[in-house]
Amino acid sequence: MAVAELEREVRRHNHLYFIEHSPVISDYDFDMLVEELKRRKPESKVLREIGNDISGKFKKVRHEVAMLSLDKAYDLKTMESWAEKFEGDIIVSPKIDGCAMSLRYGADGTLQLAATRGSGTVGEDVTPNIRFVKDIPQKIALKNVEVRGEIYMPLSVFKRYKEEFANPRNLAAGAIKQKDPTKTGEYSLSFWAYDILGAGAKDEVEKRRLLEKNRFPVIEWKLIKKDKIHEVFEDYLKRREKVDYEMDGVVYKANLVSEQERLGFTAHHPRFGIAFKFQGDSGVTTLKDVEWSVARTGVITPIGIVEPVELSGAMVSRVSLHNYGLMKKLGLSKGAKVMMMRRGGVIPNLEWVVEKGKGEIEAPRKCPSCGSKVELRDDFLYCTDAKNCVQTKVGELKHFVSVVEIDGLGDVLLEKLYAEGLVTDASEFYELAAANLSTLERMGDTLATKLIRNIQSRRELPLDVFLRSLGIREVGRHTSQILAREFGTLEHVLTVTQEQLSSIHTIGDVIATEVVGGLKAKSKLIDKLLKFVKVQKGEPKNEASGPFKGMSFLFTGSMLTMVRSDAEKLVEEKGGTIASGVSKTLDYIVVGDGGGAGSKLDKAKKLQSKGEKVKIVNEKEFLKLVKQ
Ligand code: IVH
C-alpha cells in the first residue's frame, strides 16, 4: 500500500470508529495500520488526528493538560524495554474499553466541567450529560483538581442492547453525546477513575487513595516489580471474562511521579505509561450461508453460518449479523473468507470480509416463518404479518416462559404446543391440563403432571415481572422495575399517560411512547392473563418479609467474589434496602475484599466509635449473612 493510501485508510477507519461509532475492522488491525504509518511516515499529520472524536454537537473546550493516548505493545519484549527506562515499581490496571473523560472540579469542589478527549488538546463539553452518570460525584472535598477516567457501559447493561449495537464502547460513546442529557441517563453508564491532576500526589498509589477518599470508583490496581510484567498480564487475561466491563488490555505506568516527569512525552504519548493489549481472539473462516430468523418483534435477523472456528477456546459456527443494513455494509457473499472475533473475548462477531466469495446473498422476500411479505424499514427487515407469524408467536411464548421462569418448557415443546393449537397466547398456558400434554409425542404422564405443576406455581407474579413478561418493546428489566416502583399497582400502570412517563428521569419520550402504545396493544392479553394470574403490588422486594427486612446495607470498595450490583440484588431479594450513604440509620457496611474502601468506611468507623449500630463486615461475612 502506498503511504498516501495508508494515510487515507487510517483516516477512514478512525472516522468510522470515533465519529460514526461503527468500526468495520478490528481494533487490532487498526493498531497495525497505525503502526505501519508510524514506521513509514512518522511525521504524518494523520497520526495526530487519531482518536479525535469531535462530533461538532457540543461546545469545544481546551484541555488544561493534553489528554494523550498511551503507546501500545503486543509483546513482552516491547514491554521489557519500556520498563528499563525508569526507576521504581510499576502500577498496573485493567485497560477499560470505554471513553476517556476529564472532570474538572472547581474552587468549591463542585463538578464544573466534563469533557471528552476530542483531539487530545480540544475536547467537547458534555457536562450536563455527565451529571446523569451516577458514579460521578458532583461535589468532592478536594479543590481545583482534574479527575480522569473512563466512562463505560457495564456488560450487564450492554446485554440489553447487544442485538443492535456492535460493542459497549461505541454505545457508551453515543450515549454520552446525546443532545438531550436525560437520554444519557437512560443508558446506565458507569465510570472508573484512573488519574487525578493538581492534587500534588507523589506517586500513583497516593493518587488512587485520594480518588477513593473522594468517592470515585477507582479501577482496580496492583503495584508490581518489573519482573512481574508478564505474570500480571496473564492474570488479567484470566480475569477478563469475570469483570463487568470490556477489558482490552493492561495499562502499566511508572509509579513515581518524579520519574514520570523525568521521562516526559513523545509527540503522541507519555513515555511513563504503556498499554499491553490483548490480541483480539480472532480467526478467519468461511461464510457458508446466511439464515434468517424471525424474532418476537417481527424483525427478521440474518444469522451467518460459518465453517466452525475456534475463538478463545469455544467453537463458533453461527454468528448474528445484527440486521440487514449492517449485513449489507459488510459486503458479504457466500464462500467469502471472513474475520471473526470475540469482542472483549465474549461476544462472537463477524468483523469484516478478508476475501470476497462468489455466491450472492439475497434478502428473503417472504417471511421464512409464515410466508408473509417482508418489508424493509431503515436497516431492518420485518415480517408484515408479525401478529400472526408463527415464529413471532412462539417467540412471545418463549419470552413469557423465560421471564416468568417456568421450568421445563423448552423451545421444541413450545413450538409443538403452538403448532397443535394448544397454546396460542401466554394466558393459555394456565389452561393446560396434563391430559392435553400427554397427547404430545414423547410426553409421559409424570412429565406432563410436573410441567403443569410448574406452570401453576407461577400464578402470583411481581408487578415488574408481569410487565416484562408481556413482551412490550423497551419494557425490559430496567423499565419494568421503574414502572413498578413509580406506580405501584397494575391498575395504575395501565392508566399512565405519556407525559407522566416521560417526566421520569430515566425514561425518555421514545420509551414512554412504546410503553403506552404497547400496554394498549396488549390489553386483551392482559385481561386474559388476569383471569389466572395475581399481580403483586410494586416493589414487592421492600415489602418482602425476607431475613433482611428493615435492614439497610451499603457497599464500599471493589468486591472480589461478585459484582456489586449482584450483591445489591441479593440484599433486595432478601428484603433489605441499599442505603445511599453512611448515616446513623445504616445497619451494615460491606467492605469489598478487593481494596479501595475509602471515605465511606472511615465514616462508618467514626459512627461506630460513637456507639452507633452500624456493623462493618467483609465479603465473607456478608455471604454468611446471606446464607443464614
Ligand atoms: S492511564 C495517557 N489507565 O486508554 C493516558 N488509561 O490510549 C493514560 N484507558 O485515553 C491514561 N483504561 O482513556 C489509563 N486503566 C487505565 C485505562 C486507560 C482505559 C484509556 C484512556 C486512554 C487510553 C490510552
Image (tube, helix red, strand yellow):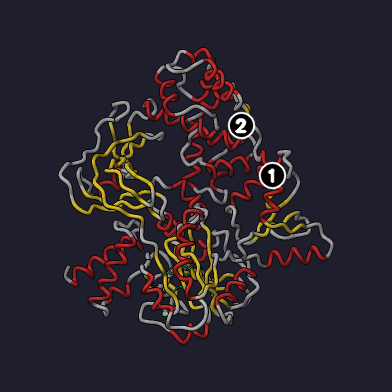
Q: Is residue 206 above or below residue 239?
A: below
Where residue 324 sits, quadrant-wise, is top left
Q: Residue at x 25, y 76 (%)?
A: 39
Q: Residue at x 53, y 15 (%)?
A: 445
Residue that mark 2 sits on? 461
Q: Which mark is residue 627?
A: 1
Residue toward you, 447 or 208: 447
Where does residue 19 sit, x and y in percent of width and height?
35, 62
Q: Residue at x 66, y 45 (%)?
A: 572
Quick check: can you spot residue 626? yes
Report helix, strand or loop for mark 1. helix
**Which quadrant does the C terminus fall into?**
top right
Where does residue 386 sit, x and y in percent of width and height?
37, 30
- The amino acid pointed to by label 2 is Leu
> Mark 1 packing: few (<14 Cα in 10 Å), some, or many (20+)?
few
Cα–Cα gap, marks 1 and 2: 24 Å
Give the left or right position of residue 184, taking residue 27 as reference: right
Q: Is residue 488 above or below residue 53?
A: above
Quarter of the image where ligand 1 sits: bottom left
